[in-house]
Image (cartoon, helix red, strand yellow):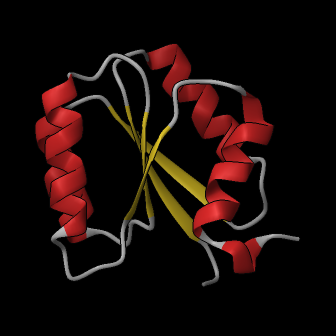
């Protein structure tokens, strides 16, 4: 895996922008952000997403639906529920899913 692609979904633009910056401060990590829940399904289906990162402001039912959607894809898309805690926590969450990336 050369680049780890994230789709960060949430409802607070400032938090999404911060998460994008934190993610892209890591070599080989790229993030797209999205606030439109309906558009997320097409993005995940039609692009090379490795991790869907759920941020704040999302409805519980949407979170359940997007997790089920990702689990049922033929791709190996991981879902992380991230509601804060800093860049160290985020890295730990990613390395738990992809231990081979850990430095």
Left or right of 73 in this view: 19: right
Rendering quarter of residue 85: top right
- The extreme right residue here reads 103
Residue visible at 65% across and 62% down?
Answer: 96
Figure check: 66 above or below 95: above
Observer-nearest residue: 22 or 86? 86
Rendering quarter of residue 55: top left
Q: Position of residue 2 (x, y in %)?
A: 64, 82
- Image quadrant occupied by the C terminus: bottom right
Left or right of 31 in this view: 66: left
Q: Position of residue 24 (x, y in %)?
A: 69, 49
Observer-nearest residue: 86 or 31? 86
Q: Position of residue 25 (x, y in %)?
A: 77, 47
- Image quadrant occupied by the N terminus: bottom right
Residue visible at 48% across and 55% down?
Answer: 6
Residue visible at 10% across and 39% down?
Answer: 38
Figure check: 98 above or below 51: below
Report whether residue 24 is seen: no
Figure check: 46 above or below 55: below
Left or right of 95 in this view: 16: left
Report whether residue 60 is seen: yes
Q: Position of residue 74 (x, y in %)?
A: 21, 82
Residue visible at 52% across and 25% down?
Answer: 83
């Amino acid at each position: 895996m050369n680049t780890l692609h994230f789709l960060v979904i949430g409802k607070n633009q400032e938090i999404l922008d911060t998460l994008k910056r934190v993610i892209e401060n890591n070599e080989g990590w790229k993030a797209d952000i999205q606030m439109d829940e309906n558009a997320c399904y097409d993005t995940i289906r039609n692009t090379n997403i490795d991790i869907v990162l759920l941020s704040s402001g999302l409805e519980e039912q949407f979170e359940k639906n997007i997790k089920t959607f990702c689990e049922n894809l033929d791709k190996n898309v991981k879902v992380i529920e991230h509601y804060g805690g800093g860049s160290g926590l985020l890295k730990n969450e990613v390395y738990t899913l992809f231990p081979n990336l850990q430095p």
